[in-house]
């Protein structure tokens, strides 16, 4: 060991680089991806995972693989750091220039998400009913089609059945549409303040486009019958209307500042901190 250390006195021994962990992660991902795609994807994932695991273990057992990395020449090394007696001024969070503040500094109230979800949901429902009247002469077609997401029997129903009134389907569609609208409305209230430029465009066009693409890509695998009945042009138009209306409602509300600039005692509501602040105000009032 002494001779080996003496031989590499101008070098350092480090673990050898390996790509086996990356391939093992890829194999594990393919295994789970095959559960929602095809069994061949799972088989390929198992093979990749097993081969990469064997290669990985061979790199560390029975002895770890290492490589010798020479030191940088003394002339090229960085100079020794000399401590300075000078001090620096520490900036406090929320100072004059909002040092180290987490975005957003201001956010919309929770009620903005509630009203945005309700307004966007109503506007989206109107577009869907117009589509039903134009394409099938009935407002019940899009309602029953939405209920088909929770009622598999409606996914295989005929166009005449979907165009007729169904009380239970109306209840299911109302619950599904209302829950989704409120959820997305709250998301808009939370996310739009993080978009300093063109929040209405991001919420009214970009987000609906991404959501439409996600639903189109996944629904063909999860529910092909329902996927074949959806008119994606009208679907995207309804999403845009929801995004524009919900974004406009959120944008019109007044923002409130977050509590991140306040001391920790005030943010968590510790009674001692509040008493100290109140006692200081009382003392000021008595002294005044």
Image (spheres, rainbow, N blue to C red):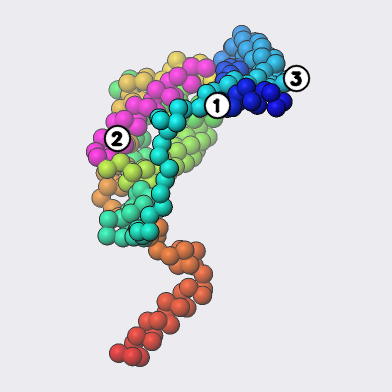
Image marks 1 and 2: residues in contact by CB distance under 8 Å: no
Was residue 205 drawn as part of the magenta stretch in this picture? yes
**Horizontal side, residue 202 vs residue 54: left or right:** left
Task: Give coordinates of residue 211: x percent, y percent.
Answer: 39, 28
Q: Which mark is residue 202?
A: 2
Q: Nearer the viewer, mark 3 or mark 2?
A: 3
Rounded to the nearest angstrom, the CA distance separating label 3 from label 2 is 55 Å
Q: Which mark is residue 10?
A: 1
Q: Nearer the viewer, residue 132 or 190?
A: 190
Image marks 3 and 1: residues in contact by CB distance under 8 Å: no
Q: Earlier in the sequence, mark 1 or mark 2?
A: 1
Q: Earlier in the sequence, mark 3 or mark 1?
A: 1
**Looking at the magenta stretch, what is its main secondary structure?**
helix
Q: Which mark is residue 274?
A: none
Binning the other alpha carbons within 10 Å of mark 1 as few (below 14), some (14 to 19) or many (20 upward) gives few
Q: Nearer the viewer, mark 3 or mark 1?
A: 1
Task: Give coordinates of residue 247: x percent, y percent.
Answer: 30, 42
Rounded to the nearest angstrom, the CA distance separating label 3 from label 1 is 27 Å
Task: Give coordinates of residue 196: x percent, y percent.
Answer: 27, 43
Q: Quadrant of residue 229?
A: top left
Binning the other alpha carbons within 10 Å of mark 2 as few (below 14), some (14 to 19) or many (20 upward) gives some
User: Which residue shows up at 46% across the image and 74% down it?
Assistant: 274
Task: Give coordinates of residue 115: x percent, y percent.
Answer: 35, 49
**Horizontal side, residue 96 vs residue 259: left or right:** left
Segment tinted magenta in the rendering: 197-221
Q: Earlier in the sequence, mark 3 or mark 2?
A: 3
Rounded to the nearest angstrom, the CA distance separating label 1 from label 2 is 56 Å
Q: Nearer the viewer, mark 1 or mark 2?
A: 1
Q: Quadrant of residue 285?
A: bottom left
Q: Quick one: quadrant of the N terminus?
A: top right
Taking the image as drawn, is residue 32 in sight? no
Q: Which residue is mark 3?
A: 62
């Amino acid at each position: 060991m002494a001779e080996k250390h003496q031989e590499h006195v101008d070098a350092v021994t480090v673990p050898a680089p390996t790509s086996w962990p990356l391939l093992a992660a890829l194999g594990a991902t393919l295994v789970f991806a095959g559960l929602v795609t095809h069994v061949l994807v799972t088989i390929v994932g198992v093979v990749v995972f097993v081969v990469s695991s064997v290669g990985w273990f061979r790199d560390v057992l029975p002895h770890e693989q290492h490589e010798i990395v020479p030191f940088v020449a003394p002339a090229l090394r960085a100079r020794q750091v000399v401590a300075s007696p000078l001090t620096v001024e520490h900036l406090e969070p929320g100072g004059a220039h909002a040092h180290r503040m987490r975005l957003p500094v201001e956010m919309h109230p929770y009620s903005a998400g509630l009203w945005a979800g309700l307004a966007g949901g109503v506007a989206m429902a109107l577009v869907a009913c117009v589509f039903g009247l134009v394409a099938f002469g009935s407002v019940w077609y899009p309602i029953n089609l939405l209920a088909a997401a929770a009622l598999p029997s409606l996914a295989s129903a005929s166009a005449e059945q979907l165009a007729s009134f169904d009380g239970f389907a109306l209840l299911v569609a109302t619950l599904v549409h209302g829950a989704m609208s409120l959820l997305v409305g709250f998301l808009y209230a939370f996310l739009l303040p993080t978009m300093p430029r063109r929040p209405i465009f991001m919420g009214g066009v970009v987000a609906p486009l991404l959501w439409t693409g996600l639903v189109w890509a996944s629904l063909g695998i999860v529910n092909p019958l329902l996927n074949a009945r959806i008119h994606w042009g009208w679907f995207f138009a309804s999403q845009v209307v929801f995004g524009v209306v919900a974004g406009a409602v959120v944008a019109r509300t007044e923002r409130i500042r977050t509590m991140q600039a306040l001391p920790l005692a005030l943010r968590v509501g510790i009674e001692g901190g509040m008493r100290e602040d109140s006692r200081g105000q009382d003392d000021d009032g008595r002294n005044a």
